[in-house]
Structures are given as structure tokens and as C-alpha cells.
Image (tube, rainbow, N blue to C red):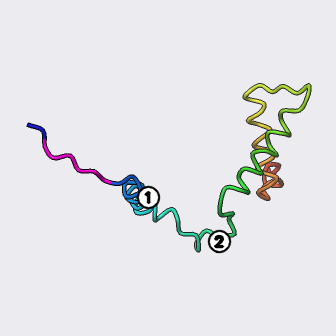
């Protein structure tokens, strides 16, 4: 014997899925604390940075080994985060 089949409208299952997502990720969505730290909120700045970085390393005639690319990325991140001078301290 098969049990009863309950029909749940699709929009209700989507709503429940979204409610669960927000409940599970509430601690990561403290936008006030993020803004107070001066960090970017949203994907726009991240996408822009990715496109900029890809454009810098994928120009015509350029090729990088994974190790050298990692070193270059480290230098760029140090410069962008204000740690450039720290790299050269003994």
C-alpha cells in the first residue's frame, strides 16, 4: 500500500528552501559588521577584480607557469592590501 501523496505547490517549496538557506547562513550575512570593516558587499567588486586580474595575466603573448603566476598574484595582493613595504623588511 502506498501512502498518501501530498501535493505541495512549487512556490512553497522554493520559499521553504530560501528560508532554510537564510537560517543556515545568518551568521555570514551580518552586513552591518562587514560595512563597518570597510569590506565590499555583493559580487560586483569581486567580479570586477577577477576580470581585472584575468585581463592582466591573459594578454597576447603572455604565458605563466602556475608557480610564477602564484608569485605574481602574491605581489599584486600585497600591493593592493598595503603590505608592499613589509615584503622587503629583513
Residue drawn at x 82%, y 52% is: 79
79 falls in the magenta region? no
Residue drawn at x 77%, y 25% is: 65
How crowded is the residue under tag 2: few (<14 C-alpha within 10 Å), some, or many (20+)?
few
Residue drawn at x 73%, y 57% is: 45
Q: Which residue is tagged 1?
A: 18
Residue drawn at x 64%, y 74% is: 36
Residue 57 location (% of width, % of height) = 83, 35
Residue 69: quadrant of the picture: top right
Residue 80: quadrant of the picture: bottom right
Q: Which residues are magenta?
A: 3-8
Residue 90 location (% of width, % of height) = 79, 49
Q: Which residue is tagged 2?
A: 35
- 38 relative to 12 in the view: left or right: right
In this view, which residue lies farthest toward the right? 61
Q: Are marks 1 and 2 in contact (CB under 8 Å)?
A: no
The image shows residue 88, relative to residue 30, as above or below, that is: above
Residue 33 location (% of width, % of height) = 58, 72
Distance CA(mark 1)–CA(mark 2): 24 Å
How crowded is the residue under tag 1: few (<14 C-alpha within 10 Å), some, or many (20+)?
few
Element on which disc 1 rests: helix
Q: Which mark is residue 65?
A: none
Element on which disc 2 rests: helix
Q: Locate the N terminus by quadrant.
A: top left
In this view, which residue lies farthest toward the left? 1
Which tag is nearer the camera, tag 1 or tag 2? 1
Amino acid at each position: 500500500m502506498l501512502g498518501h501523496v501530498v501535493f505541495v505547490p512549487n512556490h512553497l517549496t522554493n520559499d521553504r528552501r530560501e528560508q532554510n538557506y537564510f537560517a543556515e547562513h545568518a551568521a555570514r550575512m551580518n552586513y552591518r559588521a562587514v560595512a563597518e570593516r570597510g569590506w565590499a558587499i555583493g559580487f560586483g567588486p569581486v567580479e570586477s577584480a577577477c576580470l581585472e586580474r584575468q585581463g592582466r595575466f591573459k594578454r597576447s603573448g603572455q604565458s605563466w607557469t602556475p608557480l610564477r603566476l602564484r608569485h605574481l598574484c602574491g605581489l599584486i595582493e600585497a600591493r593592493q592590501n598595503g603590505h608592499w613595504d613589509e615584503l622587503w623588511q629583513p
